[in-house]
Amino acid sequence: MSRGTQLIGKTRRALAVGLPGIAQRIAQRAYRKTGAADLLFNLDLDDLLVDVPAELPVPATRPEQGRPLRIGWVTTPPAAGSGGHTTLFRIVEALEAAGHTGVLFLYDKHGLDVARLTSVIREYWPGMQAEIRDARAGIEDVDAVVATSWESAHVIVKYARSPMRRLYFIQDYEPFFYGHGAESALAAMTYRLPFRRIALGEMLDGMIREQTGLASDVVPFGCDSAVYHLPAAGTARSGIVFYCRPDFPRRGYQLACIALMVFHRRHPDQEIHVYGAPPRGLSIPFTFHGRMTTSALNDLYGRTIAGLAMSFTNITLVAEEMLAAGNIPVVNDIPLARQVLPNPHVLWAEPTAVALADALSAAVTADDLAGRAADAAASVVGRSWKPTQDAVVRIIVEEVTGA
């Protein structure tokens, strides 16, 4: 092929993709050439486990009954609005309310500004008073330490060398965050560590049991039914809503996009609302809301009919939040999921674009939308995170004191 022919071909491709496409290709080449993907792997190689230890040092004696405990939590630095951190910090607050002390050990291989992160945490989670430290400075002076992700489990083995009790609060089946490779294997091995595992929901317990043969303590999902609630009487509902996270494979982004395109062809009159991260490649009309406060999100749920609530590693908290506001969630059906969310108002769908679009269509064409919304909201009235908090506090105290 002549140089001229090659140039003509490149020019045609550039015109076809436009300036956004050209920018993406330049960025992709720079991403590969510079090894920028390494930034997403948030563990130093020296902090990774080389094997699964059979045992780790624990105290020779138990603390006396009734003594306030110091409980450490290892986690990544939180950002405002992080759902996983919010769930975790609810548990820390519950321990503090029970008279115990919390210590957050933050880990970031790129380094930490503890003062800045402390300011962020105090602003967005003001109910939690836990001391904040850098995990790499050492995990010590606590009766127990709790892993909150697979990375943090590796960090605990490396930096928590003194005798203490070790637990693992698990919110997702994290090996499924990745393709079947090193990261998946490194995540899966943490479930075999000599930690006491606390699984959020029966689905997660079943997934861990299936892969390892090991049982976990199971605690229930919660829902903020005081924050998410029905709108004012007479509020008209129309359209659907989608929580968009393109960079998180477990959220099924591409599948959701195709389902929304099928739905739009069937119901072009129904507005599609998107919040979270900006969608990429979604070639249908939509209204983008960006990141939203809980009150604004409750308002959006309260004036729409249905929403996509997708996750492949555990049930998403979004589903019950939608229900509380009278929005009908369409949830991808995977094994054990219905045990975690046994609600008759959820529309379960096989993880195909047509099945998801069918469920959305069924929601927007149903009779008596107001009545269905009221029934959905009534099904979660009184739901809170207190049962979850109480269960985790009980398990931690039991593990430390032996009571």
Image (cartoon, rainbow, N blue to C red):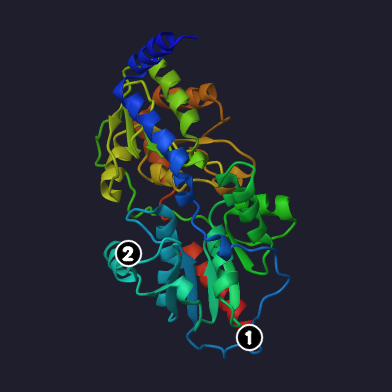
The location of residue 60, given as percent across then percent down, is: 66, 88
Q: 10 Å neighbourhood of mark 2: few (<14), some, or many (≥20)?
A: some
- Residue 248 horizontal side relative to residue 55, left or right: left
The location of residue 264, given as percent across then percent down, is: 38, 19
- The answer to whether 223 is drawn above or below residue 102 in the figure is above
Give the camera-side residue of 181 and 264: 181
Disc sitting over residue 8 in the figure: none
Hey, which residue is sitting farthest front in the picture?
Answer: 2
Q: Which residue is mark 2?
A: 125
Going from N to C along the chain, the mark reached first, 1 or 2, is 1
Residue flagged by tag 2: what amino acid is it?
A: Trp
- The answer to whether 176 is drawn above or below residue 5 in the figure is below
Q: 10 Å neighbourhood of mark 1: few (<14), some, or many (≥20)?
A: few
Instruction: Report the residue at 35% width, 74% height from top.
Output: 129
- The answer to whether 13 is drawn above or below residue 204 in the figure is above
Give the camera-side residue of 326 and 256: 256
- Callout 2 secondary element: loop
Can you tell which quarter of the image residue 36 is in? top left
- Residue 39 horizontal side relative to residue 234, left or right: right
Q: Which residue is mark 1?
A: 59
Report the quarter where the C terminus lies.
bottom right
Instruction: Report the residue at 54% width, 82% height from top.
Output: 143
Separation (CA) of disc 1 from disc 2 = 32 Å
- Residue 8 horizontal side relative to residue 358, left or right: left
Q: Mark yes or no: residue 16 visible.
A: yes
Can you tell which quarter of the image residue 196 is in? bottom right
